[in-house]
Amino acid sequence: MKAILPLLATSLFLSVVSPAQTCREVVRDSSGRVVQTVETRKSGSGTASITRDASGRVVGTSTSQSSKGGSTSTTYRDASGRVAGSATTNGSSAGSSKTTYLDGSGRVAGSATTRTNGTSGSRTGFRDASGRSAGSQATNGSSGSVTGTSRDTSGRVIGSSTGSGKCPSVPHVPSPPTVVK
């Protein structure tokens, strides 16, 4: 799972935005240093994201498409355009969703379960490929301003993020918290 984690850092807030608007997320490590930025925009029936490192270099991209059945499929690519992994998110009417991550070879790399807190936030628990806990992530806020906090398995904060622009918290395709080192 660690091999694709940097490429799964598309956004805490991957969502549908209007064509003229872009959501920009700034991701920081536990000491507050910017480690990456993610820009997400509307693309057809889904979204497209570009992830840059602290120096502004593109390190990965992703595209997400939502289906009429309520699932969202995400494809992750590295900086050279090769497929590095994918994710499938299936929602439920009870305000929760399950995401399964695959690596570039199609093997299960991990999973996430997200529970929404009304319209203002969510909490996600991550598991590695063997089912062990791999940390958590919480988001708060609504369209226009969203904040996120990532924690390791012991509850220690390992990173944070802030999103600006049209960044509603659902539909939610969570990125694993261990992308922030």
Image (spheres, helix red, strand yellow):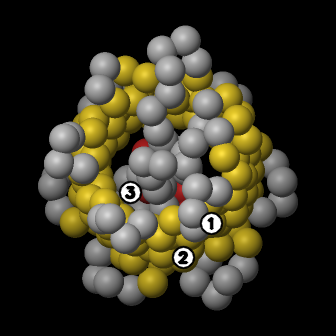
Q: Amino acid at mark 3?
A: Ala
Q: Is residue 17 left or right of residue 37?
A: left
Q: Residue 180 at x, y = what percent?
A: 62, 57
Residue drawn at (64%, 57%) of the image: 120
Q: Residue 116 at x, y = what percent?
A: 51, 65
| Badge 3 or badge 1: first in the primary sequence | 3
Q: Quadrant of the N terminus?
A: bottom left
Secondary structure state at the residue bearing disc 1: strand
Give the Cα distance between marks 3 and 1: 23 Å
Mark whose residue sits in front, 3 or 2: 2
Q: Amino acid at mark 1?
A: Ala
Q: Residue 84 at x, y = what percent?
A: 30, 43
Mark whose residue sits in front, 3 or 1: 1
Residue 138: mark in rendering: 1
| Badge 3 or badge 2: first in the primary sequence | 3
**Label 3 with label 2: CB-CB less than 8 Å:** no
Dot 3 crowding, Cα within 10 Å, few <14, some 14–19, many 20+: few
Give the Cα distance between marks 2 and 1: 11 Å
Residue on which disc 2 sits: 135
Residue on which disc 3 sits: 3
Mark whose residue sits in front, 2 or 1: 1
Residue drawn at (84%, 54%) of the image: 32
